Amino acid sequence: MERYEYKINPKSKDSLFTDILSSKEALLEVYNAVNRTSYTNVDLVEDCTLDDVIYIKFKNDKSFMLGTSINLYEHQSSINNNMPIRFLIYYAELIQIYLNNKNIYGTKQIPLHSPKCVVFYNGIANMPEISELRLSSAFMSKDDEGNPIGDIDVKVLVININAGYNKDILAASPILEGYSYLIDRIRHYEKAKRNPKDAIDDAIKDCIKNNKLKNYLEKKGSVAMGFLLAEYDEQKIKDFYKEEGRKEGIDIGKEKGRAEGREEGRAEGIDIGMNKGIDIGKEESKEDIAINALENKLDVHLISRITNIPIEKVLKMKADLNL
């Protein structure tokens, strides 16, 4: 049988999820499933995803206009409570483009597309079928009852697309259902195989056999393999990053606890390690992380992107290590 090899543009900032949603037909299908609508005219869909060359700091997974709404979609495999502020930035950038040549200082109100912010979650942490994130929950100002004070808010709908969740939504979208099935099969085969490449390869074959994302995977199986391996490697780097920062944070806390003779020092250090470990890691050990990633033969472009070390320096480090 065909074995799917790693095939991906190393400069690509997309993921398998965004590649699957690259067509208007796919976007319309998912929109209908999420909103319980039945639109059939793909010409209603206008893809407006921010260009990753011009707006690399603000790029989101997928944005598209349909009717009077602008739909911002993100895929997440880990819980991120900062999604509301990210969506606010995405929307502001898109509206700025839309407002080009329009007179915002005039008296006539300019009609705006209503934002609909959705996160499709398929991580391993326990999450409800449907949950909501709000920008206002991050506001530091509170009233006497503890409610946030502020004049702007953003609501984000988080939809759990793991196997067994939101069956009605997945049933209405073969794309979402197929993607959910693929990830579930990868996790299943990972338990039996030490090599993630073999697990992904078997999962892709499983999907084709069971008519899950069959057309996409038959045409782009090697590309899918590339996306999935890149995401796997990226998560490995992030996990290493977090662990390094967590350990350093705990060490800081221990030192402070000894110096001040207080248990609070240790507690603060653990808190720093868990909540700020990634930031500490970026400052103190990103080169160590890059070296570790190079020794584990991870992609140099991926290492550069995660550690923020220029690609030229990563390549030099690789050469210095004779890898």
Image (spheres, rainbow, N blue to C red):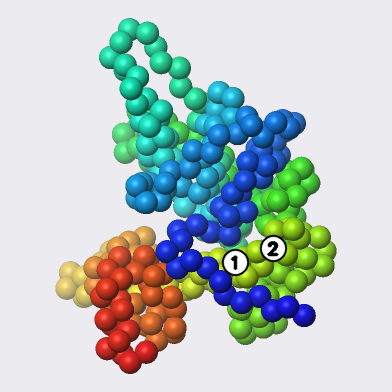
Instruction: Estimate the x, y position of residue 64 in percent, counting from the top left.
Output: 54, 37
Distance between the alpha carbons at the discs numbered 2 and 1? 9 Å
Instruction: Estimate the x, y position of residue 44 in percent, counting from the top left.
Output: 62, 29
Report the disc number at residue 197.
none
Position of residue 19 in the picture relative to residue 261 (left or right): right
Q: Residue at x 45, y 17 (%)?
A: 111
User: In terms of depth relative to the viewer, which is nearer, 2 or 310?
Assistant: 2
* Residue 66 image-quadrant placement: top right
Residue type pointed to by label 1: Val
User: In terms of depth relative to the viewer, which is nearer, 270 or 155?
Assistant: 155
User: In terms of depth relative to the viewer, which is nearer, 82 or 58?
Assistant: 58
The relative height of residue 13 versus residue 240 in the rendered view (above or below) is above
Report the disc number at residue 223.
1
The relative height of residue 33 versus residue 319 in the rendered view (above or below) is above
Instruction: Estimate the x, y position of residue 189 in percent, counting from the top left.
Output: 70, 76
The relative height of residue 279 versus residue 294 in the rendered view (above or below) is above
Look at the numbered disc 1 and give the secondary structure of its residue.
helix
Mark 2, residue position: 219
User: In terms of depth relative to the viewer, which is nearer, 7 or 68?
Assistant: 7
Position of residue 122 in the picture relative to residue 303 (left or right): right
Pick out the residue farthest to the bottom: 322
